Structures are given as structure tokens and as C-alpha cells.
Image (cartoon, rainbow, N blue to C red):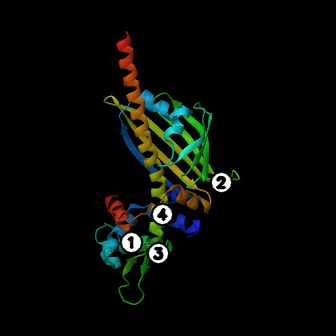
Amino acid sequence: MSQDHLSATFAALADPTRRAILARLISDEASVTELARPFEMSLPAVSKHLKVLERAGLIERSREAQWRPCRLHAAPLKDVADWVERYRRFWEESFDRLDVYLKELTEKEKRHGRKRRKSE
Amino acid sequence: MAASDAKASKGSNATEAEVVITRVFDAPRELVFKAWTDPKYLAKWFGPKGFTNPVCEADARVGGAWHIVMRGPDGAEYPCGGVYREVVVPERLVFTNIATDKEGSPILDGLTTVIFEEHGGKTKLTLQTRATAVVDYAVAHLKGMEAGWTQSLERLAEELAGS
């Protein structure tokens, strides 16, 4: 996947309505009317969001049925999630190591403290 | 295009991601701060599991530089570094983080803010980091850093549902 595509996917995901639409499509395909229902939004407004998602390759719209159901296309979503999660993972694992290291340091400190008190 | 969209795609080959992580460490704030700013301490924990830091330099003053070369379990090296923008002992650190390839060209460009808070004798750390991948290679770079980890769609579904 090119960086351009990844950018389009990030842009598409920047909007909470579009994320909610994707979350809805995880369970099943849906028509524009069905997708519009949970939002206080006109059909054209929802259609606009769907176009952004379609351009980003996140959804596909069937041309066969009259009601043109929307279907989730998860591949680009997974690429973005991988990218962000790898970044998060980097820091989470660093923090795990920091946690262990700080424990070593504070225990050392305590032992030294006890020794000092004993020799006093 | 809305302002939030523009933020997410600010160039034809740039991609931006933000990550916020909070963790409470059972150590005094001064010590946690030192673990971030003293290169001898920093070298002990920076980077994913199994990594070492054969090069670790940190000049924690505003305008000072940091430079770390991480070495993975397979021996591959990942240089990174940046410049401190804010240093408030022992409360706050803001620094740029740039990962470079072997030729020194930037492949990942980010800004990280770390906040250290007293939390009942412990220290609450909040890390906010924004990263911009500047070339395709960054994706491969990040993939290399992570050993055998895979993302499941179920996990993503939970995250999307929760947002």
C-alpha cells in the first residue's frame, strides 16, 4: 500500500461519524438509509461521508442491488491500525522495561538505606 | 475538507498518527524524571523488549540533543534522536523524535510530550506522541521494530466501537 493511500485512510478516519459508520459495517452490510438512521443527518450528508470512505478504499458499494448496500473493506483499516499500534507498542514495551528498571533502582536504594542505618 | 481531515493528511507522502499512553510507576517523580533524562538510565529501558542501546546520549536542556542507536535482537540497528523543546524538572519534557535510516535521512518525524505527576508517592506518566512517517520506508522500519506481533480485526472493531 502506498503512503498516499495510507494518508487517505487517516483522513477518512479523522471523523467520528465515519468511524461510527465503519463500526456499524463490521457486523453486516447496510444501505445508506440504514446507516443514516442512528445519526441526526440528512441522506446527502451521509452519502458524502460514504464517498470519502469509498475513495479511501474502506468501503465497497454493491452495484448489483437497487439499494446498493455498503460493505466494509478492512484491508486499509488494518494497515493504519498496524501502523498506529506498532508505534503504541514501541512505547508500551519501553514502559514495561522502565517499570522493571525503576523497581531495581528503588530496591537498591532501600537496601543501601538499611545498610547505612545499620552502620550508624 | 474539514480541519481535522487536513491534520491527518498534511502532505502527499506524509502520514500522521497520535498515540497517548498513561502509566503509573511505583517510584518517586524525581527518579522517574532522571530515568528519562540521564543517558546512563535511559539506555537501560528505551526501546522494545529485547533491544539494547549501544549508543545513548541525552543533553536534557532546551535546545539540547538526544541520540540513541537501538539494536534489535537480530542485531539490526535503529538510530533515532531529536532536540529537547521544553525541560521542566521534574514535571515535563517535550522533545522531537526523528528516526533515520543508515544514510541519516529522516524516515519518521515526531513530537513527544511527557508529563510527570505525583500520584500518592508514585508517579503518573502521560506520554503523548505524534509521529509523521515521511517515506514508505518508515512502515518497514516500524515493522522491523516489532517482533512477530499481529493486529487482529476484532481488536480494531472494539476500538472503533469505543471511540
Dot 3 lies on which element? helix
Subunit of label 4? A
Give the CA separation, mark 3 to mark 1. Answer: 12 Å
Q: Which mark is residue A54?
A: 3
Q: Are marks 4 and 3 on the same chain?
A: yes
Dot 2 lies on which element? loop
Nearest the camera: A106 or A40? A106
> Which mark lies nearer to you, 4 or 2?
2
Dot 1 lies on which element? helix
How would you rate the neighbour count of disc 3 (Cα within 10 Å): few for under 14, some for 14-19, many for 20 or more? some
Q: Are marks 2 and 3 on the same chain?
A: no
Residue A110: percent from left, percent from top = 37, 24
Above or below A47: residue B152: above
Q: Amino acid at mark 2?
A: Asp
The residue pinned by badge 2 equals B101
Please tell me which residue is depicted at 34% across the width and 79% down the height of the picture: A31
Above or below B23: residue B13: below
The residue pinned by badge 4 equals A80
Please tell me which residue is depicted at 35% across the width and 71% down the height of the picture: A42
The residue pinned by badge 1 equals A46
Give the CA separation, mark 2 to mark 3. Answer: 34 Å
Quadrant in the rendering for residue A24? bottom left
Residue A46: percent from left, percent from top = 38, 71
Q: Amino acid at mark 3?
A: Glu
Give the CA separation, mark 4 to mark 1. Answer: 23 Å
